[in-house]
Image (tube, grey):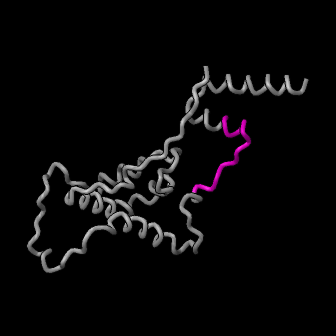
Amino acid sequence: MVAKLRKCYFTSQVEQLHSSDPRQWWSKTKRILKKEDPNPLVNLDYLGHPDQLPDYINDFFVSVSVHLLKVDPAILITLTDDYCADYVVDPADVEYRLANINFLKAPGPDGIPSWLLRDFAPYLCHPLASIFKASIREGYFPPIWKAVDVIPVPKTP
């Protein structure tokens, strides 16, 4: 009898999932599976003092370009902007995009929570715009930017 009631209960719970939006679907699925909400900073893999967290994040962004050769400061005077005006990355645009990130979405492979990018948009927009400009100028797209986390969700009949 207990097994039959349990099966009936979970069947009704799964039926309710069919009519819910993705956010409700994940919320209900976690509740059915009795999963607790994880700490959003758990993917940062950072155990140090909170005052050193910005340095840790900075080190991550620096690691994206670690393979590039150092630029000789003497030639910087002779360099001009040689890339097309169509590909200019404006810090204001970057800030706007960061400020409008959906904080309910899961973090990517870097583990940086979307709320952190959204809340610190004014501070991150200039460095990120510089990184994007350098990527366009060098014609190099870092492999980590191509990485994604794919979580298959089974279809139910």
| Prevailing secondary structure class for the magenta stretch in the rendered image | loop
Residue at the spot 71% in from the left edge and 39% down from the top edge: 31
Q: Position of residue 97 (x, y in %)?
A: 36, 49
Q: With 86 as the anchor, is 38 left or right in this view?
A: right
Which residue reaches farthest right? Answer: 1
**Quadrant in which the N terminus appears:** top right
Q: Position of residue 64 (x, y in %)?
A: 36, 63
* Quadrant housing residue 73: bottom left
Residue at the spot 46% in from the left edge and 72% down from the top edge: 55
Image mark count = 0
Vertical side of 80 occupied by 76: above or below: below
Q: With 65 as the anchor, is 82 left or right in this view?
A: left
Q: Is residue 32 magenta?
A: yes
Looking at the picture, tell me which residue is in the foreground, 138 or 119.
138
Q: Position of residue 152 (x, y in %)?
A: 54, 36
* Quadrant housing residue 21: top right
Q: With 134 as the anchor, is 146 left or right in this view?
A: right
**Quadrant in which the C terminus appears:** top right
Residue at the spot 53% in from the left edge and 61% down from the top edge: 44
Q: Is residue 64 magenta?
A: no
Vertical side of 155 occupied by 132: above or below: below
Which residue reaches farthest bottom? Answer: 74
Q: With 14 as the anchor, is 151 left or right in this view?
A: left
The magenta segment? 29-40
Which residue reaches farthest top? Answer: 157
Looking at the picture, tell me which residue is in the foreground, 116 or 47.
47
* Quadrant housing residue 7: top right
